[in-house]
Amino acid sequence: MAGNGHRGWLRPEWLSLDRGPLFPTLLLLPSAVLLGGLLAFPLVLGVLLGFKDATIGSEGSFVGLENYRYLLTDPVFRITAFNTALYTLVTVLFKLALGLGLALILNQRFAGYRFWRSVLLLPYVVPTVLSAFAWWWILDPQFSFISWALVKVGLLHQKINFLGNATLARSSLMVANVWRGIPFFTVGYLAGLQAIPKELHEAAAIDGASAWQIFWRITWMLLLPLTTILTIFSAIFTFTDLQLLWTITRGGPANATHLFVTLAYQRAIPGGALGEGAAIAGFTLPFLALLAWGALDALRRQE
């Protein structure tokens, strides 16, 4: 009986390169090792580091939840939590709305529509640091062409210090993030719109449905699963937006534009408090895990 059970467990076809799982396993093994070494190992190391008082040049000792207790009493961390939630929510909503609107326009056949579809990708394909430097120049209190133009036409008497005021700095960074993230939604929605059979719209129009009814009851309902996927992925990208913010404001003025990622980087690398920086990053893990689970679940439902 044991021998039969063993033979049933180790089936010859499992070792076959044509039908068994051995061949796909061998193909996936290098990627699994690479991802494990570059992602899983640093992630585990970072989580463990959050429970130590480690600094640059010192391994530190185990302090348990002390780093997390301190952060909960840190006013800068509380401002950062508010900034992260506000920044993510506002920018994702604007990117969704504007991306859908542009997709509906670019889904039409008009003169030069292929050109405008190509131009749309520019904000997304330009390296983030280069686009961040461009926005930093646009928002600079001395060289901003926005301020210059408003002063020239007489709407302002002096230049605007976009990055010197907390509210203006937050708003400016949100505009920059929305500008960069719109193509992600537009391309996704454009693909979704082109996958909708035209017969559905034609049949609804014949039945007397208005343009708004066709959009709301047919187009939007068919785009809803795609919307869930795009929104979750965009939230993950926005939640971890380090390059744009660090290049333009470095969390200023007076910590008013810090996100979790920028504060963690500031405390850990320039500040040298590796344990505290790792703890800040550790606060983001439950939210990112929840978003990742939502994305996977949405993808599974889409299939």
Image (cartoon, grey):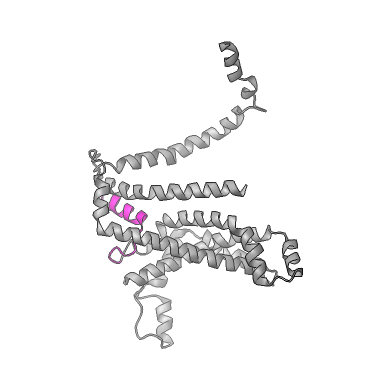
265 is higher (above) or lower (below) than 82? above
Q: Give coordinates of residue 157: x percent, y percent.
A: 35, 86
180 is higher (above) or lower (below) than 13? below
Q: Which residues are magenta?
A: 253-273
Say whether residue 207 is left or right of residue 96.
right
Q: Give coordinates of residue 253: x percent, y percent.
A: 30, 67
Q: How many marks?
A: 0
The foreground one among 226 and 182 is 226
Q: Which residue is at 24% across, 45% downward?
A: 66
User: Does the segment drawn in magenta span residue 266?
Assistant: yes
Residue 238 occupies which quadrant of the picture?
bottom left
Say whether residue 143 is left or right of residue 3.
left
Say whether residue 113 is left or right of residue 59.
right
Residue 129 occupies which quadrant of the picture?
bottom left
134 is higher (above) or lower (below) than 24? below
Q: Which residue is outermost to the bottom?
A: 154
Q: Which residue is at 47% across, 50% downward?
A: 291
Say whether residue 254 is left or right of residue 19.
left
The foreground one among 189 and 242 is 189
Q: Give coordinates of residue 43: x percent, y percent.
A: 39, 42
Q: Which residue is at 27% across, 48% downward?
A: 68
Residue 283 visible in the current orientation: yes
- Quarter of the image with the N terminus in it: top right
Q: Which residue is at 57% across, 48% downward?
A: 299
User: Does the segment drawn in magenta span residue 11?
Assistant: no
Q: Give coordinates of residue 133: x percent, y percent.
A: 42, 65
Residue 136 visible in the current orientation: no
